[in-house]
Image (tube, rainbow, N blue to C red):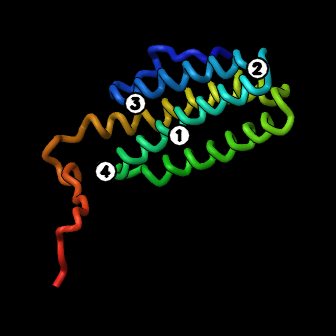
Amino acid sequence: MSANWTPELAVNHAQLDEEHVEIFRKLEAAARSLAGTREAAERAVGTLADAIVENLVSEERLMEETFYPDRSRHRAAHELFMADFASMRDELREKGPTPLVEVWLGMRLPEWLRFHIRVNDAPLAAHLARRRPDEPGDVRWRPTGTHRVS
């Protein structure tokens, strides 16, 4: 399976689409890095991990800020995925680029990303598109240190 982003994965939310494209770019680089040194593979997987975490954090922030009704289920999918990703990364650190790591980067991760984008992120993007700027939940209270309770 190819680790390439394709247009049918677009969710029509600029930020999420940009982040997804970047994840697929870094995934492709990580998969290619397995042909090199162990250190190069670990660096590439670390770069991929950073992009994934950035995307998951941004999705969770959007879900919280807009009171997305499916945020608990969506967040649980992120947690399961990251536990699995951590296992693969541990395998890479302990044993190097094993066949299990190759399968993970070449098939399992691209499959999970495609599934997650279609099943979780597309409905989130639709929710975000339906919201109006003046809807409750768009303006968030931010502590400034100047508020006092008497």
Question: Could you say whether the residue bearing mark 4 is in a helix, strand or loop?
Answer: helix
Q: Marks 1 and 2: in contact by CB < 8 Å? A: no
The residue sitting at 38% across, 47% down in the picture is 61
Name which residue type carries label 3: Leu
Circle nearer the N terminus (3, 4):
3
x and y percentages locating residue 25 in the rendered image: 55, 18
Real-space CA distance between mark 2 and mark 3, rounded to the nearest whole angstrom: 27 Å
Task: Say which residue label 3 marks.
Answer: 16
Name which residue type carries label 4: Glu
Q: Marks 1 and 4: in contact by CB < 8 Å? A: no
What mark, if any, has residue 65 been given in the picture? 4
Name which residue type carries label 2: Leu
Relative height, residue 51 to residue 27 (above, below):
below
Task: Say which residue label 1 marks.
Answer: 53
What mark, if any, has residue 113 been given in the picture? none
Real-space CA distance between mark 3 and mark 1, rounded to the nearest whole angstrom: 13 Å
The residue sitting at 45% across, 14% down in the picture is 7
Horizontal side, residue 33 vs residue 73: left or right: right
Quadrant location of the N terminus in the rendered image: top right
Mark 3 residue crowding within 10 angstroms, few (<14) / some (14–19) / many (20+): many
Circle nearer the N terminus (2, 3):
3
Towards the viewer: 39 or 117 = 39
Towards the viewer: 39 or 6 = 39
Circle nearer the N terminus (3, 1):
3
Real-space CA distance between mark 4 and mark 2, rounded to the nearest whole angstrom: 39 Å
x and y percentages locating residue 92 in the rendered image: 78, 34
Question: Could you say whether the residue bearing mark 2 is in a helix, strand or loop?
Answer: loop
Circle nearer the N terminus (4, 1):
1
Horizontal side, residue 127 vs residue 10: left or right: left
Identity of the residue furthest to the left in this view: 134
Name which residue type carries label 1: Val
Task: Say which residue label 2 marks.
Answer: 34
